[in-house]
Amino acid sequence: MADLNPIHAWKRLLALPNDSRAKTVAVAFLTAAVCAVFVSGATVILRPIQAANRAAEVQLRLESLLSAIPGMADLLAASDAASLSTLVIDLDRGQAAEAVTPESLETTLLDTSSWTPLSPEQDLAGIGSRPDFAQVYILREEDRVALMVLPIAGAGYNGPIEAMIALEGDMETIAGITITDQSETPGLGARITEPAWQADFAGTRYQDPSGEMRFAVARGPAGGPYEVDGITGATRTGNAMTRMIRFWLGPMGYGPLIDAVQRGEF
């Protein structure tokens, strides 16, 4: 009868010659198993820390964006802390989500049913599918919305671009933008992270009085109220920014929310 004692089996394995194929395979398997356990454990332990770091980074960039908007520092100083609120929006309805909170949003978006596939005609931003819920930031002055900060994302030249764009209370004028993540070419497309370029967004309008989307990153200097200066040698990145902003401020993005704010429902 075979000896099934694991200790004896281990001893027999160790007694095999080092060039034994069975011993080599067994040691490789055990090493891989141990490494997998350590990696899985580290992932579980580090996940809350990574999430906290991401949240802190977003908060830092949000504060930087707000402080860079003309006149916003005075407004923030005059407002109490409760004036800046965060809210999860149901993008289809343009209303506050009924069962999703900022705390549960990340878990909700792990479910593929919480995403809407986009057709090629709809997918200006190149994201493939759009989340059904998004967390936005609202700054109120007395009983009106003075500013709304919206997270946006799209496909850049070298990879995804993530940003936050701020709209003035009229919901027709861009107040500012900050790039939160990108992998564009250093010295070219990556210049979208430069404060001087981002500052050019303040006061830019994104649609004309008829409601037609007009925003664009120009190929050179901006030529009108709907354009911001282009970046020399980074036409593809500029085009990506144009498409991303047009998508998210349009009907498949925050359009329903923007309409609701303009109707006075927020």
Image (spheres, helix red, strand yellow):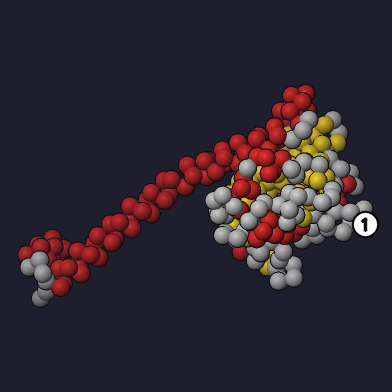
Residue 76 appears at what percent x and percent y?
74, 28
User: Above or below — where is 76 with respect to 18?
Assistant: above
Is 266 in front, or is 187? 187
The amino acid type found where label 1 is placed reads: Ser
Name the residue at 84% across, 48% down: 225
Q: Report which quarter residue 167 is drawn in.
A: top right
Image quadrant for the C terminus? top right
Is residue 3 at all visible to an observer of this figure? no
Name the residue at 57% across, 59% down: 159
Residue 265 horizontal side relative to residue 252, left or right: right
User: Above or below — where is 152 with respect to 196?
Assistant: below
Residue 213 appears at what percent x and percent y?
83, 58
Is 121 in front, or is 82? 121
Residue 168 appears at what percent x and percent y?
81, 41
Q: Which residue is denoted by mark 1 in the rendering?
A: 210
Is residue 68 at all visible to an observer of this figure? yes
- Dot 1 falls on a residue whose secondary structure is loop
Image quadrant for the N terminus? bottom left
Name the residue at 89% across, 56% down: 211
Name the residue at 28% across, 61% down: 32
Q: Report which quarter residue 118 is drawn in.
A: bottom right
Residue 25 horizontal side relative to residue 211, left or right: left
**Dot 1: few (<14), some (14–19), or many (≥20) neighbours within 10 Å?**
few
